[in-house]
Image (tube, helix red, strand yellow):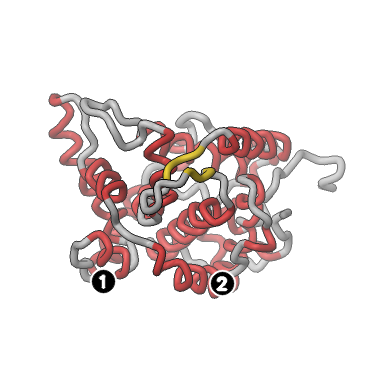
Amino acid sequence: MDESTGPDPGLYGPGSVTWQCHGDPVMWIAGVRALYLQALHPRAVRGVMENSSAFSGENGGGDAWGRLLRTADFVGTITYGTTGAAERAGARVRKIHTMLSATDPATGARFRVDEPELLLWIHCAQIDSFLHVLRRSGIPLTPEQADRYVAENRVNARLVGLDPSEVPGDTAALAAYFERIRPELAAGPDAHAVDAFLSAPPIHPLLVPGRNLVWRPFAGLAYATLPGWAHQLYGRPAPAPRTVTRRLRLTGTLLRSIPAGLRWKLPPGHILKAMRRMGPGSRPAPYTLRTSAAILDRPGRA
């Protein structure tokens, strides 16, 4: 169907790597990994700590859950929503960021949280985490498709206020960015607060056994997938990579065994809404990337 008269595919569309992959359940693990990684930029994490209750409070007072869910909702909206919904979501994020500032932990100077260098760090840590966990958990992306994924998500960068031309456009550029930024990274008190919260978030005492049984292994796996230099910054030895990969693939297999139709019914239901809008052929299926070159036919729109 002609896109000029047919349903709105949004900013990515079913022909993108992003559309096919963002419905995978390991994205939740990737999201937690991104939080661990993002916390290693002292100014970026200070901006979070001063402007939200995400990683503070007792007896469930922190809003890390809300932050994770809001991030998931934003990613779902810009991936599977209409063009208008995605643009409005981006506008809301940009507006909020213009009103926020924080104190530099090293100098005491005030800074805006929408400084391009901070937005770029958050973006790159997120995209690196998404791509790393997807591939390591068994999603069969070729090097070309991985590059395409990074390039497509310049759309995401534009929506939060970055100039797409200044954002890494392939995996080599993304790796070079991390090499360049690493001297600025450190695990200060804020990073350790995030680490402690994610390892054992405060909840009602009656729920502690469930947290220890379900959440701690989940968060521990997300942490384990961090690069070796991040483990060094946090001050703990990195686990054996092969062991982590086996655990991640097993977890991915278990999560994917849950019927997609059941998983996608959870609020806010972005994928099911997109499938109703675009038709059954738009169903996200990352394993089709192994045999289909059509995924590269339609670029994401920056």
Answer above or below: position of 248 versus 189. Answer: below
Residue at 45%, 31% in the rendered image: 266
Visible in this render: residue 70? yes
Residue at 43%, 38% in the rendered image: 263
Visible in this render: residue 271? no
Q: Nearer the viewer, residue 240 or 117?
A: 117
Q: For the residue marked with disc 2, what is the amino acid?
A: Ala
Residue at 50%, 39% in the rendered image: 101
Q: Residues within 10 Å of mark 2 (few under 14, many from 20)?
A: some
Residue at 77%, 39% in the rendered image: 7
Q: Residues within 10 Å of mark 1 (few under 14, many from 20)?
A: few
Judged left or right of residue 268, residue 48 is left
* Residue 238 screen position, x and y as percent: 22, 67
Q: Which mark is residue 173?
A: 2
Q: For the residue marked with disc 1, what is the amino acid?
A: Arg
Q: Which residue is mark 1?
A: 242
Judged left or right of residue 76, residue 282 is right
Answer above or below: position of 165 versus 22. Answer: below
Answer above or below: position of 166 versus 62. Answer: below
